Image (tube, grey):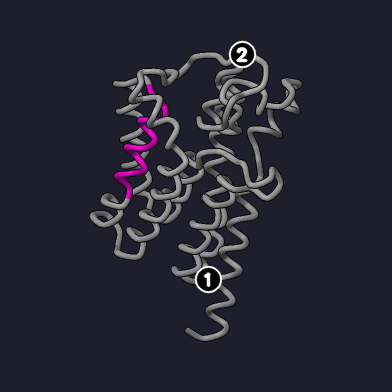
Amino acid sequence: MSGESAFLLLLALAGGYLAGSVPFGLLITRLAGLGDIRAIGSGNIGATNVLRTGHKGLAAATLLLDAGKGAAPVLAFAALSPEAALAAALGAVTGHVFPVWLGFGGGKGVATALGVLLALAWPVGLAACATWLAVAALSRYSSLAAMVAIGLSPLYAYLLADGPAALAALAVAAIVIARHHENVRRLMRGEEPRIGRRGGQGPAPDRTE
């Protein structure tokens, strides 16, 4: 790998990280006068927790913006090289999960990961989105739907795209699923909240949804 290629990959990784680290859920809820989303429900900054405020429009906006911030750097760097697009994809999900602006305590990265997958290879992204919708409709558990959808994305990428895309999807899936470890425990105990449940005000014990 030449020095120029290495620099491009680092630039793509950093660009993806900066794009992914924008906390749209936090910004939107503050602009709407709802205070700090981290003091509501699970304390997470993603669309699922925004939905717990009872504002479906804000949750939808958060979902679209979080997906967009994953897709945008991938599409931008794809114009330069496929490898740079993969680096941007990994950076975007890492940025959402570990944003420097929030002390590296971010969201689960599901919407951002779906945006990344749609930008890398739209059939893979659509397959993951369809999986999420199907599992969510059947179980009413957002976390379970996310883990199944993102967990199957490397297989979808292998079948519908190529090897590098499958490796990128595998890395993204590892990050997202690792961030759901508390959800796994709650699912096993039967304590995981279902989609649509509102969260009350007050300090959240963790940021796991």
Q: Say what amino acid the circle numbered 2 marks.
A: Gly
Q: Is residue 105 above or below residue 182?
A: below
Q: Is residue 159 left or right of residue 5?
A: left
Residue interval drawn in magenta: 141-153
Residue 14 in the image: state x and y as whole percent. 62, 62
- SS category of the residue bearing label 1: loop
**Label 1 neighbour load within 10 Å: few <14, some 14-19, many 20+:** few
Name the main secondary structure of what is drawn in magenta: helix
Seen at 39% across and 29% down, the residue is 185
In this view, which residue lies farthest toward the bottom? 2
Question: Label 2: how many residues lie within 10 Å, few (<14), some (14-19) or many (20+)?
Answer: few
Question: Disc 2 to disc 1, how far (Cα)?
Answer: 46 Å
* Residue 19 covered by magenta stretch: no
Classify residue 161 by image quadrant.
bottom left
Instruction: Determine which residue is flagged by label 1.
Output: 80
Q: According to the image, label 2 marks what residue?
A: 200
